[in-house]
Image (tube, helix red, strand yellow):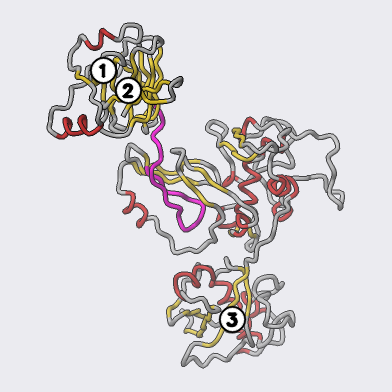
Amino acid sequence: MIRLWDLGQQRCVHSYAVHTDSVWALASTPSFGHVYSGGRDQSVYLTDLSTRESVLLCTNEHPILQLSLQDDTIWVATTDSSVYGWPAEGQTPQKVFQKGGSFLAGNLSFSRARASLEGSAPVPVYKEPSFTIPGVPAIVQHEIMNNRRHVLTKDTVGSVKLWEITRGAVIEDFGKVSFDDKKKELFEMVSIPAWFTMDARLGCLSVHLDTPQCFSAEIYAVDLNVTGAQEDLKINLAHETLRGLLVHWSKRRPKLGQHSLSNGDSSIGKDVSLKNLPHPRSDVDDGSENHANNVLPSFEFSTVLPPSIITESSSGGPWRKRITDLDGTEDDLPWWCVDCAENGRFPKENTKCGFYLHPAEGSPAPNITQGKLSAPRILRVLKVANYVVEKLVLEKPLDGSPDSTFAMGLTSGTSALDSSSRPGLKPWQKLKPSVEILCNNQVLSPEMSLATVRTYIWKKPEDLILNYRVVQSR
């Protein structure tokens, strides 16, 4: 219903039954003699408030959210991302009624709805808009992939795309394909903690980071193709993403009064675990000295279509800025983001996984461990196999460390791969045994991480139990 109220009398003086569903938008002529209305029924009506005469101006493909009258054009915003301008005769709305199709607005809302159901719905005066301001198709469906870096989306035109959120970029456009089929096709059996939440209420992807949960996900640098990275170097996804987002802010920070680190290293902002790597110069570098703000390629955000940061200001209201517009003077960035991006400090989440390692049933291999072991969740099964090999060949840990930690095969200076060259070994010890690791009687792929095994193979809340057996070398 459209209702006309007299504010002096504080009551409704007229009701106009025009629409067949909720009315969400109104726009009046300057003289307040006529009103344009739109809503959920995807239609725009023009109604004479004095004579109750009404006419269907136009119909849209989506529900109408806003109307704005500008001279002889009525601008219509719908749940679609485009804006449409329709002829309105704003100065002389009587001309619209002369084109026919008008009816008298009823007093009861069901009368218009009943007329529509009976097939006597009015014909719109205009078939096509005069102007169209095209918008970007809005994202209506999204799915976070198991690797926690890629997100599959579908937009209003049916296009399915794969995004890499650590770069804020589309890495593949699949076109108009089945979203569910593509999701199954891209499934990876990997388990990485959920370090962000996401929604698409704005029609675009909004990624939410909260401390300390966002720092729970790590990945090996070699999996990101970081050149020169050590095999066991781990990268925290949220840490590197924040550094990529705030690279412009860090670069433009006032240099005066900047404190150096306690050891005299003034390269604040450089990730300590990565500072010895040959970081490529970021493509956002404007040529100025940028030794402290190099960003890994997998975390470089576009300067052509930069993402925006939304946070809460010190006064309590939200503010929003593109990352390229940050000038270094913003004091409203959360302190934990600043500490992470500038100083490389962030809360270390517990990324360990406890497990037991026993010989497989029926295997003649000896029991090489006492009690529970512990290792990073992202440790690969291949490393566990190497650990077993070293234990079987050397009969004792290389560094004498107890079995309660999983130091063997990870940080020890000598590995099973070069054990045959050690002096004093018996002939049988020089043969490198080949080991298979099992869980629930299933042979595990060497590339699997402990977290993946626990999620997809073990599937129990109790501590993980792995088994090993020696197989004939192929």
Q: Assign the N terminus to one quadrant of the image.
A: top left
Above/below status of 230 relative to 99: below
Residues at marks 2 and 1 touching, judged by CB atoms closer than 8 Å: yes
Which of discs 2 and 3 lies nearer the camera? The answer is 2
Which of discs 1 and 3 lies nearer the camera? The answer is 1
- Residue 134 visible in the picture: no
Q: Which residue is mark 2?
A: 14
Q: CA distance from mark 1 to mark 3?
A: 87 Å
Above/below status of 68 relative to 325: above
Magenta stretch bounds? 135-154
Q: Amino acid at mark 2?
A: His
Instruction: Report the residue at 21% width, 29% height from top.
Output: 112
Q: CA distance from mark 2 to mark 1?
A: 9 Å
Q: Position of residue 145 (x, y in %)?
A: 45, 55
Q: Which residue is mark 1?
A: 52
Q: Position of residue 286 (x, y in %)?
A: 67, 30
Q: Which residue is mark 3?
A: 388
